[in-house]
Structures are given as structure tokens and as C-alpha cells.
Amino acid sequence: MDVNQVLEGTLSPDVTVRTNAEQQLTQAAEADFSGYLTTLAQELANEQAPSHIRQAAALALKNSFSAREYARLRQVQQRWLTQIDANIKSSVKNLTLKTLSSPDARAGQAAAQFLASIAAIEIPRQQWPELMPTLVQNVGEGQDHQKQASLTAIGYICETEDVELRESLTAHSNAILTAVVQGARKEEQNDDVRSAAIQALSDSLEFVRTNFENEGERNYIMQVICEATQASDIRIQQGAYGCLNRIMGLYYDKMRFYMEKALFGLTIQGMKSEEEDVAKLAVEFWCTVCEEEISIEDDNAQATAEGSTETRPYFNFARVATQEVVPVLLELLAKQDEDAADDEYNVSRAAYQCLQLWSQTVGSTIVPPVLQFVERHLRSEDWHYRDAAVSAFGAIMEGPDEKMLDPLVKQALPVLIQMMDDSVVQVKDSAAYALGRICETCSESIEPSMHLQPLITSLFQGLSSHPKMASSCCWALMNLAERFAGEPGCQENPLSPHFQACVTHLLQVTERGDADNQLRTAAYEVLNAFITNAANDSLPIVASMSDVVLERLEKTIPLQQQVVSVEDKLTLEEMQTSLSSVVMAIIQRLDVEIKPQADRIMQILLQLLSTVGAKSSVPDTVFAAIGALANALEGDFLKYMDAFVPYLYNALGNQEEPSLCAMAIGLVSDITRALGEKVQPYCDTFMNYLLNNLRSTVLGNQFKPAILQCFGDIAQAIGGHFETYLPIVAQVLQQAAGININEQTSYEMLDYVVSLREGIMDAWDGAIVAMKSGGKAQLLAPYVESIFQLLQIVYTDPNRTEALLRSSMGVVGDLADAFPNGEYAEAFRADWLTVMAKEVRSNREFQQRTQDTARWAREQIKRQIGTNAFTPFRFSTPEFPSPASSTNSIRYIPSQH
């Protein structure tokens, strides 16, 4: 292999050449991984090689130890630990460190990335002890390019999300801080070095907490950062404000002194900078202040409610700074770029976001300065200020006291509606968005008899007037539909008099010749909102609308043959997805009344499934619509199963399209709940696919809780017939319950384990109810012990959700009900079980159904305790299979289909 030629190929714009080169690298790595690493490291360190080749070598080396999936990352890291000889490791690391000193700055920067990937493996294992001292020495004594590359390497190492590495870096905080602060000082003459140091400092702030606790060290760090905000180099200014943002988020409780002495003034100065990127970061500093203070207030309120005297320090930074900072934010609102794309984040949008947060933080305190600005500029000849005035008013709709806002909103509504006719589209769009904010947060201030008609008319006129306004108008209309829906199932609501005109207008908008995909999709979403929130007196209109929507959907099917470009395909898929979602909304709102249309609906949806290509987004929505139809028809859905189930089986087995597979798993639950025992002929195949998906290495962990829940739904549907599947399902549930939480568990893994336990409980509850109803409760006997052990784990673990506790209470009650003669009375006498039921029942933050479930479980526990079992129930200690091997023993159920 000519390494130069192959590396050159990895950078080729030609996809074929690039793919071929990448395949050659993969083959070389598989054939001789040690030789592969050595060759690339030598090329990286080769001063005679072109810069781009050295960079490609570094990238290939880094990719050898990188992966998006956590499990895959651990696999590739293990190759370095187990497959590479110590001498080769040492050679590769030394060549990489040598490259940091290269006069070729780009090669040094690239080497820093690879170096960080090896550091992520070795530092947590207390290997490569000389790395940090070497990097510090490079920064202190090296040439400028060596300093920059070493600081960049420190930054890459510190920006890791790896839990083990993050913990290990704390031990290196002194070395890290020495290097980055030395490079970030104003005495550093090279701006490239100083910029790299400021970035590395930002990345390392989380790991220098011990240093930050020391007042002297903290003062020096803050001095260096504050001085950096005054640098002439814009990159250094940006990095300094970025550091201040992170510090405020991490060390709010230490910031009072610095806010009073420097940060108020520095950040206001930064917000006024002519450099937009600097101004945005200065604005974001105050966003961070507001977010922290909102969070602290919430935490302190919860602590007080729980009777705790331990509260977090709260300094009211935003409230104190309102008179100085808010006027600057308001001025920044007027710095709109009329050519900015809808998703472009500029200083004006940053200021709007900050103003929203400020309003939520300080409440009514923000109203006077904003109102003064609005009154001064609402009629301004400069559209920038008219737009800023409208935006400012919309931004403060959440936070201030409703009684203060109510008269202001009533006074402003006619003016904002009038501004929907402004000559400048940006102002019209902001007026629509402000109206949407009012509909979302202050709908009580809208008088239906006085405001609804002109409000709806203005929003539909805006929707028709300019594509740029589509998003804001549609969002406002959706908020309007949701806020004026009335009570569920009400006979009429404030929208009833306008319902026919609204849906007619929306159907017209979606058929306009000049409507682009964005407008059409947004209008269909609004139509869904109106249908979902329709009062009973509007249901005949919804029913008649179904004919129009189904006809449109049917007409899209032949268009599949006319697709000639990617753009055509996307347009058609968006149209079919939108129409299918409207069909679903109609089904859900009409419920059983959809029955006369059901045959036609299923015919069209099955035609859609038969014509769409692979990797299409349409089947997801079609499946959702079919799920809604199954819920509406219940047992009557059975007649469609034979025609539909092949598509469902294919989706369940399609692990290459995870979203479709997930939708199919949910649909199995819907269908089993709808059909009850009638679903039994299809259950063998359902269970095969579900078990196969459970042990898949392709599908992520997030699928497993839904699959376990699906087991419970199948069990409840088929009752005693679930006996066939009980042993294998029980084995799966016991293995899944063995996955525990400890101090090292990441937040992502924590969420997964909690949701997994919810799925386990739902599955056990379904199985218990099934065996009880089928008169086969005795088949549960081998598993009762492990069920109680899991219940105790849930009780003792503070990481539990209301849903998990509700499911647990359901399991307790149903298990007691399944064994009414006290066979397991001793287990129910456990003190922790009674305490658990009482805690859930008495928690006023929980929903009523959760409290009711706990109350019922408590009654069942009392009955069990009151029974006289012939033999005391005693637990032995079972040996569960380890979580790592939990998939190995899953077998297939023989299918009858």
C-alpha cells in the first residue's frame, strides 16, 4: 500500500476514490493493526510530507479510536490496550508528541486530536504519566507553534464527555491550569497561542473546581479572563466571553464579588461591540445568568416545600442589572438583518432570547423599561425599531404578573393586529409571532367576542401574504386552537363559530399553486390542531372533511411513478406524510364514528405502504394512523389484519430503519390492546420479532423498554394463552432487572435504566394479570421472589419516576390479587413495601391515578397481611445471569406463520 497515495485519496472530492481509499485503510488496519498505526504515525511525524497528507494521517489515526456509540468506542479503545505491543505504543505516542513541535502548524493541530484520543484511553488507567508534564513544559518553554499545538491538545483532552476521563482529569487540574493560564495571560505576545490557551481554559473549567475554591487562584484566573476580553484579537475576546459563560454556569455561587467589580461593565461593553460574534457571546453571558437564577429559584422553592433549610445562594444579578442591561438588549433587537435566514442566529435573535429569559427571571420588574421602549418606537419610521418594539412586547409575555399584563395585552391586541398589515414583511412576521406568544401564555386576556374574529382573519391574511410569515402565523393559529379548545368533549367552544371558515381556508392554502413545502406542511399541522381541538358541534365538519383529505391522499399514490428527482421525492413524501397525519387526527377525534370510512381509509393506507420506497418517512405516519384506527375500531379491526400484518412484520424486522421499527413496536401494542384475545394467531410471529430486536446490536437501548412494555400488552390481550411465552419473557425480565445504577452511571444510562425498569414492571404486570385471568397464577410462582427483589430495588433507589412507581404499585396490587389465599403473605409483610405504598399514595405532586393505584395496592397489602398462610414464605438468594450476557440465552419461539 502506497500510504501517501491512499491518504491523498481519503481527501478526494470524488466519492468513489474516497470510498476506495477508506476501504484500503480499513483493510490495512484489520490485517496488521500495529503496523498500520506505526506507518501512519511515521507519516504524521514526517517533516518531508505535505501538510495535507500529515493531517489525513492524523485523522485516520484518530478515527481508529473514535466511535459515536459508547459500546463501539469501548471496543476500539480495547484494541489499543490489548492488541498493541508496549514498544509500539511508546513509539506511536512519541511520534505524536514530536509532531506537536513541528513547524507545520496544521500538522501539529491535527496531531493534537489524535493525541487526545489516546489520552482518553490511558489517563483513566494512570498510564502515560509524562503526558501532562510534557504539555505543560511545551507551553512554558516551547516555540510558539509548539505552545499552540500543546494547548490545543489540552483543550481536546478536556472537552471529553467520557465519564472515566473526566474524573481522572481532576487529578491533573494543577498541571492543566498552569499551562492554560500561562498561555492566556496578556503578557503572551502570540495571539494564536493566547487564543488556543483561552479555548483550552474554557474546556478545562469543569476540572479545576478545587483551584476555583481557592480565592487567590480564582482571583488570578478571573483576572486573566477579564483582561482577555480587552484583547485586540477578536478570537481572544470571543474565547474570554465564552469562558465567562461557562464560569457563570459552573460557579455562580462564587461570582458576586466579580459581578460587582468587573463583569457588569465588561459584559455591557461586550454587548455593544461592533463584532457580532463578541456581542452575541456577551448577550449569552446574561442568558446563562438568567438560566442559573431560574434554576436556583426552582431548587430553593422545592427545598422549602420539602422542609429543608439548605438552599443555594441567590444574588439577584438579573434584577439588579435590569436598568442597565435591558436597554442594551432592546437596542440590539433593532440590529436585524433583513436578509437573514429563518434559522440564522444573530445578535438580534440572541437579544430576543435573553429578553425572554430575563422576563421569566425578574417578572414584572422588566415591564416598565420594555413598555417605555415599545411606546417610543412602535410607530417609528425606521422599520428596525418598529420590529424591535413588537418583538420586545412579545418577549415579556411569560414571567410578569398576569394582572399586570392583562390590561396591556388588551390594549396591544388591536395594535398588533393592525401591524399585521405593515409595509415591511419582517414587522408583520414579528407581529404574528407576538400574537402567537399572547395566544400561548396570555390567552385569558383575549376576549373571544371582541378579538377572535379580527385575530383569526389577520393571521390567515398573513399566512396568504408572504412565505416568510408562514411559520409564525401557523404557530399562532395552533396556539389559538389549543388555548380555546374548551374542556375535552365539550359541546361547543369559542372556536366553533369560526371552525368552518378556518378549516376551509387551511385546505385552500395547502392547494395554492405558489405554496412551498414549508407552507403546506405548516398549514396541515394547523389543520391537525383545529381537528384535534374541535368541539362536538364541529364534528360533522370534521367528518365531511375526511372525504376531501382521503381524496387528496389517494391522488398522491400514482404520483410515485412520476418522481424523477430527489426534490420530487421529498415533496411527494412531505405531502403524503402531512395528509396521513390529518387522517390520523380525524380518526382520533371522531373515534368510533370513523367506522363508516374505515374500509376506504385502510385501502388507501395499504396502497401507500405498497408503493413507497425504502428509507421513506411516509410509513411512520401511516403506521400511526393505522394505530389510531385500531384504537377506534377495537375488535372490528381484525378484518384488516391479514392484509396489513405483512407490512407490520417487515417493519418489525427492519433494523436498518430504527424509527420505522420503533413505530412498529408501538403499533403491536396498539393492535393487541384493540383486538384482545383475537390477536393470538399473530402473537408467535410478534414475539419472535420482538425477541430478535431485543438482542439486536443494531438497535439502540432505547428500544428495549418499549419491547418489554409490548410483552405486557400482549400478555393482557391474550390472557392465559401467554403461558407459552412466560418462561422466556420472565428470563428476559430477570436479566434486565440485573442492570444496576452506581455513582459512575452517566445521566444517559441513568435515564435508560429507569425507563427499562418501567418496561419491566409493565411486562410483569401484564403477565400477572394474564395468568390470573387465565386461571394459571401458579405458573408465576418461580418468579415471585425476583419480582419482590426488583420492587425493593425501586424502593431504595432515589432515581425513580412517577410512572415507575405507578407501575410498581400496579404490580404489587395485581400480584396480591393473583394469590388471594396468602401464599406469599410473608413477602407482603415487609415494612418497606407498606412504606413505599404510603409514600406514593400521599405524594400530592403525583397524578390522581398514581395515588389511586397506590391506595388500591395498600388495600391489597392489608388483605395479604390479614391472611394466614400455611407456610411462611422465605426468600433465597437467586443467581441472575449478568446483564452483559442477558441476550445470549434468548431463543426464538417457533412461528406458525
Image (cartoon, grey):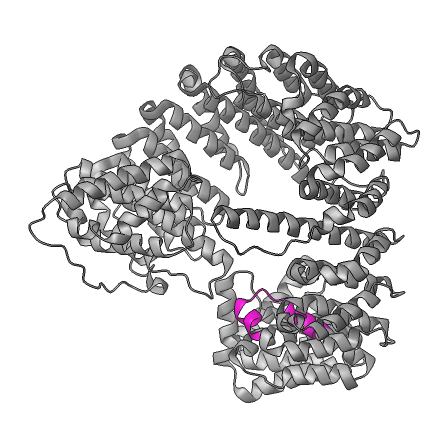
Image location (x, y in percent) of residue 28: 57, 74
Residue 49, placed above or below residue 339 = below
In this view of the protein, which residue sits in the foreground, 699 or 53?
699
**Would you say the magenta stretch is mainly helix, strand or loop?**
helix
Furthest-right residue in this view: 381
Image location (x, y in percent) of residue 735: 31, 58
Q: To which quarter of the image does residue 739 belong?
A: bottom left
Residue 396, placed above or below residue 66 = above
Residue 506, placed above or below residue 793 = above
Can residue 111 be seen? no
Q: Is residue 864 left or right of residue 704?
A: left
Image location (x, y in percent) of residue 797: 38, 56
Q: Residue at x 15, y 58 (%)?
A: 874
Q: Which residues are magenta?
A: 152-168
Q: Is residue 465 left or right of residue 452?
A: right
Q: Quadrant of the N terminus?
A: bottom right
Q: Residue at x 85, y 29 (%)?
A: 375
Q: Residue at x 68, y 63 (%)?
A: 254
Q: Residue at x 34, y 25 (%)?
A: 634
Q: Is residue 305 magenta?
A: no
Residue 199, placed above or below residue 35 = above
Q: Is residue 138 left or right of residue 668?
A: right
Q: To which quarter of the image does residue 670 belong?
A: top left
Image location (x, y in percent) of residue 472: 71, 30
In this view of the protein, which residue sits in the foreground, 437 or 152?
437
Furthest-bottom residue in this view: 87
